[in-house]
Image (cartoon, grey):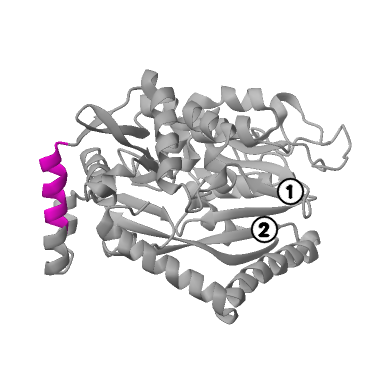
Amino acid sequence: MARRGAAGQIRAGDAEGTGPESGTPASGPAGPGRTAGTGTPEGFTVTLCRDGREFAGLRDEWDDLRRRCSTATPFQSHAWLESWWRSYGGGPLRIVLVRRAGRLVAAAPLTLVHRPMPLLVGLGGGISDYTDVLVADTDPATGPDRDPDTGPEGVDAVYDALERGLRRAARHAVVELREVRPGAAAERLYERWTGARGALTDSVCLELPAAPLTDLVERLPTPRAQRVRAKLRKIDALGIEAVPAGPDEVPEAVGRLLRLHELQWRGRGVTVEHLRPRFEEHLVRAARRMVRDGDAALTEYRLAGEVVAVSLTLASERMTGGYLYGADPGLRERRVDVATMLLRHETGFAAGTGRRVVSLLRGAEPYKNQWRPEAVTNRRLLMAPAALEPLLRLRTAQAGLRDRTARTVAERFPAAREWRDRLKDWRAAAVDRGDAG
C-alpha cells in the first residue's frame, strides 16, 4: 500500500507499490519561483483520499467544486457518488484531490479494482449514465475558464496538477473511465495525458434542449404533433396531477417507484439490479440529499388520489435527466402515454430551473427518437503511465473484442437479429400505447 504524508499527500515514488518513506512530497505549496513538489504547478496541493469517512467529509467542498465545473452531470454529485460507494464500493478508494490556497479546484473520483487487471475506474459503476472528473472552470461573474481559484496560470494549470497526481496514483494500474460525455473534463484531461492512452466508443445518449414540451412539439411533423397534443389533452382530462415529494417523503416515494417499475416490466425482462435492496438503499440515500439540495426531483403522479406513477429526475447545474420511473400497467388500459406525461414534467423542470439540456440518458429507443433528439456518443477513455502501455493495449483489445462480438452476434445469427427487430417494433408500438418504459 502506498504511504502518505501529512493530510494524505502523495509522496514521490509512492503509489500502489512501495517507495522511500523519506521521499519528497509530490505536491504542496511552493516557495517563490519554485514549483510544488515533482513538477506540480506552483501553489497547488495534490492529495489522495483513500478513506470512506474522509470522502463523506468532503461533501460541502465537493459540491462547491461541482457547481464550478461546467461539464458536470448529475452523476458527479457528492450525494450520488458517496451513496454509491456505500452500497457498491468494493475496492479501495483512490480519489485524487487538487487544491489551491486550500480550496478544492479538481477531483478524480476513482476506485481500484484488480479484475481482469489492476484498473482505476470511476465511482458510480454501471448504474451511472455518465462518468467524469471535476475541474473548476467557471465563475458566475466572469464565465468559463475564469474561475478565480485556478490562479494566474488559468484552468490549464489545474489540469496539469490533476494529471500529475493521477499519474502517481496510477503507477501500477490503468485508468479506465466509462461513459465519458463529449466535452467532459475527463476528455480534456485525456487530451493532455503524457503517457499511454486509448479510446473506444461507449453508449449513445439522446439529448433535447431544455424547453417546455409545447416548444418541442413544434419540432415534430404536423401529424405527430397533433397526436402528441391529443395525448396531452387526454392526460389533462383524466386529472392526473404531478406532486413533488419532499426530502422526508423520499423513502416511501422511492419504494413506490420501484414497486411500480417492477410491475410495468413484469414478464418483460426487468433489470435485475433495480430489484435488489442495495439499489433501493442507494436511491433513498442519494435522492434524499439531492431533492433537498435542488439536484433532483422525485415526483408522484396521482389519479383520483392514487399514485399511478413515480419518476426520479436528476440534475446538475446545466443538465437534467429522467433517471428511472415506475408506472401502473393499468394506465395502458386508459390509453395514457406515460412517456409523454413524464417528459412534459421533466422539460418543465429543466426550463423552469434554468438548465440547458434534457438528457434522455443511455439508449436510442424509438420512443425517445420520436422527439428528434441529438445523439451524443459517450467514450471509454483509458490512460496509463508509459511503462504500462502493453497493459493498456491489452485492456483496449479486450474491450474492443467484446463490443465487436456483440455486434457480430446481432448481425450473423438470425434469431438474435429477429429478437432485436421484434424488440424495436414492440418499443415503437409502445409509444402509442403509452407504455414506453
Could you tell whether 115 is left or right of 280 in the image? right
Residue named by callout 1: 170
| Coordinates of residue 35 in the picture (x, y in percent) | 66, 42
Q: Looking at the image, which residue is at 11% across and 68% down?
A: 222
| Closer to us: 41 or 9 | 9
Q: Could you classify mark 1 by the number of other residues whose Cα lies within 10 Å: few (under 14), some (14-19), or many (20 or more)?
A: many
- Visible residue check, residue 156: yes
Q: Looking at the image, which residue is at 48% across and 70% down?
A: 420
Q: Which mark is residue 337?
A: none
| Coordinates of residue 338 in the picture (x, y in percent) | 28, 48
Could you tell whether 195 is left or right of 342 in the image? right
- Magenta segment's dominant SS is helix
| Closer to us: 48 or 51 | 51
What's the amino acid at mark 1?
A: Ala
Closer to the chain start, of discs 2 and 1, is 1
Q: Could you classify mark 2 by the number of other residues whose Cα lies within 10 Å: few (under 14), some (14-19), or many (20 or more)?
A: many
Q: Quadrant of residue 245?
A: top left
Of the 4 image quadrants, the one containing the N terminus is top right
Q: Which residues are magenta?
A: 228-239
Circle 2 SS class: strand
Is residue 134 rendered magenta in the image?
Answer: no
Q: Looking at the image, which residue is at 66% across and 27% down?
A: 52
| Distance of label 2 from label 1 (alpha carbons) | 9 Å
Residue named by callout 2: 383
| Coordinates of residue 81 in the picture (x, y in percent) | 55, 36
What's the amino acid at mark 2?
A: Met
Could you tell whether 291 is left or right of 110 in the image? left
Is residue 236 rendered magenta in the image?
Answer: yes
| Coordinates of residue 166 in the picture (x, y in percent) | 67, 47
